[in-house]
Amino acid sequence: MLVVLTGGTGGAKLVQGLSLEAGPDDLCIVCNTADDFVLHGLYISPDLDTITYTLAGVGDATRGWGVKGDTFAVLEWLGKYGAETWFKLGDRDLATHLTRSRLLREGWRLSQVTERLCRALGVEATLLPMTDDRVETRIVTSDSEISFQEYFVKNRWADKVKKVYFAGAEKSQPVPGLLESIRDARAVVVCPSNPVTSVSPILAVPGIRAALTGTKASVMAVSPIIQGAPFSGPAHKLMAAMGWEVSTYGVAKAYSDFLDVILIGAEDRELKARIEEIGIRAAIAPIHMNSLDDKKRLARQVLDLL
Ligand code: FO1
């Protein structure tokens, strides 16, 4: 199987392309859950939902999250009651959070809930949360400590970040079958997701990084950075806060203990030699994904290289 490590929006584009080009049966998607949080008493898993909705063909591709054509009547009424409305939960999306929260309360594991939601929406690929345990990305700023969604959505990544850490990661365990999937994979693809807040939490779950280093399968990443800037989101700010070089080289370096190949944009061709000096092959390709054709073309390129 092709094992794919991903976060939400950026990764979902490549996941969609890979599902169309490789077929959903061949895909095992390992998804970040450290952006998860509780709001209005509901357990929300934004990255799992983005991947599920995308593969089910019901995702809002323009926003990159939520359900296409969703309405926000419940949110409007929550506002009347003085509840927080900065996180835009749509009416249909809320049905997902209500169902997930109920099943978790009934004792289901997150991986079991995910399988049930995927099946209900007709998703054929295997989607695994990185862990069934609670791991939470915490953003330390100069004067406070906040959750990822407060940093990303509420404060629109304006805070000066001093440190990022993944609370609970050291005590977490990968979901059943995840390490075996990496061990037996025909190839592993790290999506162009935020390397600090989408991929690093997955790597922080004990055993996953070692499985990537140990697998015989070829491990490839698609760079989320081009000419020192991310395609979207605050990866540049967070990489700088981690002391990483904000470039495709910085991404390759962060993954250098397990990465065999990185796909980089032609605009970054002058970094190829530096990347190859640390033992990673750099292949040049158009890595923008602005249309469905782009997603399929990039997926085809990844599959051909693997
Ligand atoms: N991202 C936003 O920028 N603003 C929102 O209001 C927002 C709501 C939202 C609701 C459900 C969901 O599954 C995702 C949502 N996202 C929103 C996206 C999400 O929080 C981030 O893109 C990911 O956590 C980063 O990977």
Image (cartoon, helix red, strand yellow):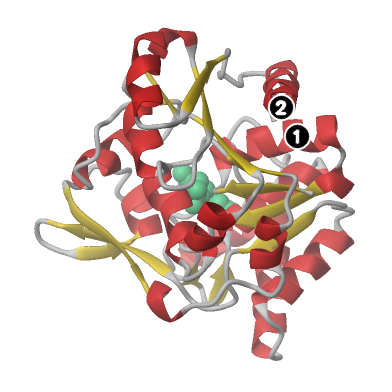
**Label 2's element?**
helix
Instruction: Give the residue type at disc 2.
Output: Ala
| Sooner in the amino-acid sequence: mark 2 or mark 1 | 1
Residue located 41% across and 32% down the image: 279
**Residue 269, quarter of the rendered image:** top left
**Label 1's element?**
helix
| Left or right: 298, with 141 as reference point | right
The spot of residue 170 in percent (x, y) is: 39, 76
The spot of residue 226 in percent (x, y) is: 41, 20
**Residue 285, quarter of the rendered image:** top right
| Left or right: 145, with 42 as reference point | left
Q: How crowded is mark 2: few (under 14 residues within 10 Å), some or many (20 or more)?
A: many
What is the count of numbered marks?
2
- Dot 1 corresponds to which residue? 18
Front residue of 210 and 131: 210
- Pointer 2 and pointer 1: residues touching (CB < 8 Å)? yes
Residue located 28% across and 43% down the image: 238
Residue located 79% across and 49% down the image: 1
